[in-house]
Image: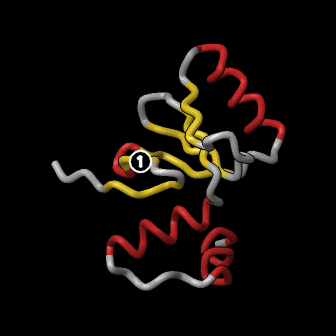
Amino acid sequence: MFVELVHIGFGNILAMNRVIALASPNSAPTKRTIQEGRNKGLLIDMTSGRRTKAVIFADSGHIVLAALAPDTIAGRLQASRGAPLPKLEQIEESVED
């Protein structure tokens, strides 16, 4: 099994094959999910005391907080795969379809 590791800031590395979703922490449902994860002991804070810019959901139920934006993490994943980086307009168009 191939494990794809991506640097998510401040010396923290994440196994991307276990990631289900990357989200922004600004919405109320995401904030509730973070609090529920904290109460259940499933929250992993990898921000090193910085502001949370991304919430990463793992297939194990763990919730990872990162200080890098979701698009930065996605860009690093694409760069590690050697694929060209998609433009923001392409991402928004594919979401709307």
Q: Amino acid at mark 1?
A: Leu
Q: Image quadrant of residue 47?
A: top right
Front residue (pair 9, 1): 9
Q: Please, is residue 62 above or below residue 89 in the view?
A: above
- Residue at 40%, 75% in the rendered image: 79
In the image, what residue occupies the spot 53% across and 62% down?
Answer: 73
* Residue 61 horizontal side relative to residue 49, left or right: left
Q: Nearer the viewer, residue 50 or 72?
A: 50
Q: Position of residue 77 (x, y in %)?
A: 42, 66
Task: Quickly name the residue at label 1.
Answer: 14
Estimate the x, y position of residue 28 in percent, counting from the top left. Answer: 83, 38
Q: Give the mark count.
A: 1
Q: Is residue 6 above or below residue 27?
A: below
Q: Secondary structure at mark 1?
A: strand
Residue at 37%, 81% in the rendered image: 83
Q: Using residue 97 as the reference point, say whether residue 9 is left or right of it.
A: left
Q: Residue furthest top?
A: 40
Above or below: residue 70 compared with residue 28: below
The percent position of residue 53, horizontal first and vertical second, equals 70, 52
Local packing at callout 1 (Cα closer than 10 Å; few below 14, some 14-19, many 20+) is some
